Amino acid sequence: MKLSAVLLRERLEDIIVSYHFGEKSEELILSRPEFLPKKSPLKNGQLYIICSENLSVLRHVPMGCCLICTGDSPPEHLGQANTIINIREEFDVFDVFNILNTIFEQYDNWERQLLLCVSEKKPMQRFVDASMHIFENPMYIVDSTLRQLVKSRHNVFSNTPSDVITGDMEKLVLLYASTQSVTDRDEATIMWNDQLKLSVITKALRSHNRFAIAVTLIEANRPFRESDIVLLDYMSYYVLMAFDFGHISTSEEESPVSLATVLTQLLREEIVPVEKVNSAQRAYGWEPDHSYRLLFIKAFKPEHNFATRIYQCRQMERQFTSAIAIASLDENNVVIVNTSLSEKYSDSILLLSTVLKRFDFVSGTSCEFSELTKVTDYYTQAKFAFYYGNLICPGKSIYDFSDYSLQFMLSHCCGGQNPDHLAPAGLKELIENDQMYGTSYLKTLLAYCDSKFNATHAAERLHIHRTTFLDRLLRIQGFLRTDFDDPSDRLHLLMSLELTKLQNQ
């Protein structure tokens, strides 16, 4: 991951002589260190290692660039927009290079652990455990009701091996309850309460535009550093990804009340109490009597970077504002749209289609439904619409199940038997006759069915004389031994013909 000049100054404080910070020195913008290039220009956001003699001949250093210099900087380089950190002269450039790479490797490992926590559906406790050596202070994660979800297992950096004092959690709840503004801020915030004698850095996270979860550090083992705020912001990004897309549970018996989490559990056919479903719905303004649609969304070129997938889902979410919940099942995204909260659902679908095309996504949509606990049935519908619609009509972005519901019924009506065994006995013989002798009995039969069993209209459709058509129809009846005037025989024939179409696609 990228690091900030402020963080590097904190980590190198034992060997630093002096430093000068330019703009954006607190942001995570610096890539792994490089030695100063001889000819190529310096890059913005890059970390370079240089000795003071070479720095004296360096004329231009771009803004956002950071130089780690062994020895004192020449006066002309102070006061510029770039950042310079001076290291004691007994350390040469190779010593500094190795030290910096060790620091970067520690934070790269942390980033990998956070990503694994999300992608491998680890419990929320793992986020806290993976981050303790980064922050060195107790950490809590609470939900929107200020219920504790997880906390640091113990004070690993103190002499006391016990768990974090329960009183800290009680103070934290009081601090949140007395300071509502924390839920309105986008960045991690330092909070201090004289009465409670409590200093914290807290990050309030919003899911579907509502305060859903908060990550908090308590100043107990050591004073807060400037970098703690930026790093907590960074960690919270992964915590919210996991919370929003239902990949995590807590260390407690109950899971956080996340609509996406509940939807994911339902889609995995886990047993979810109705009370929990209703609680998740109420948290986001959804009611049991609302109407919903499910979208099964798949990328033809799967994106293996989880963070990129989340970004793409966020772009889809914007088309529906608060009337959408996104869950994830295997490598597929599942979107539930609350049509009762979407004033212009059709307009939103058009906007969503544009987003789908941009990311090379294709979607199948279910029928409208109202019972969220039956979401697996509508997941099946949307998935069928995606696969069947893309098969017979490739190139579209959205396929609606209502256009393919007959094919769905037919594909599930045979009970595993071969459709040929259920069709009228002579239908297979008729088709084989066409193939062997070049006749067009099947085409004639289809035209007759499409013309609502009207001989005159069928003859016109085929551009043949009515007498010729009736002659063919007599031969077709000889194959099928079907009474075209009988409603049951007609239905059996129509279903058999549709099954034949499905088999040939």
Image (tube, rainbow, N blue to C red):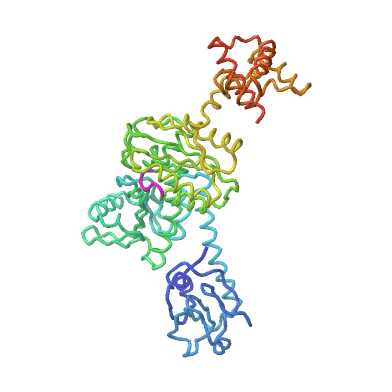
Quarter occupied by the C terminus: top right
**Does residue 425 appear in the picture of this structure?**
no
**Whole-percent x, y for residue 216 in the image:** 35, 55
Residue farthest along the right direction in this orientation: 436
Magenta highlight on residue 279: no
Magenta highlight on residue 321: yes
Depth order, front residue of 105/316: 316
Depth order, front residue of 90/77: 77
Instruction: Give the residue drawn at x 57%, y 50%.
Output: 303
| Highlighted range, magenta | 319-323
Depth order, front residue of 339/182: 339
In this picture, residue 407 sits left or right of residue 165: right
**Whole-percent x, y for residue 391 in the image:** 61, 36
**Whole-percent x, y for residue 451 in the image:** 56, 22
- Work out whether 390 lies above or below 438: below
In this picture, residue 199 sits left or right of residue 271: left
Instruction: Give the residue drawn at x 51%, y 50%.
Output: 309
- Work out whether 412 lies above or below 129: above
**Does residue 93 appear in the picture of this structure?**
yes
How many labels were placed on the picture?
Answer: 0
Q: Main secondary structure of the magenta part?
A: loop
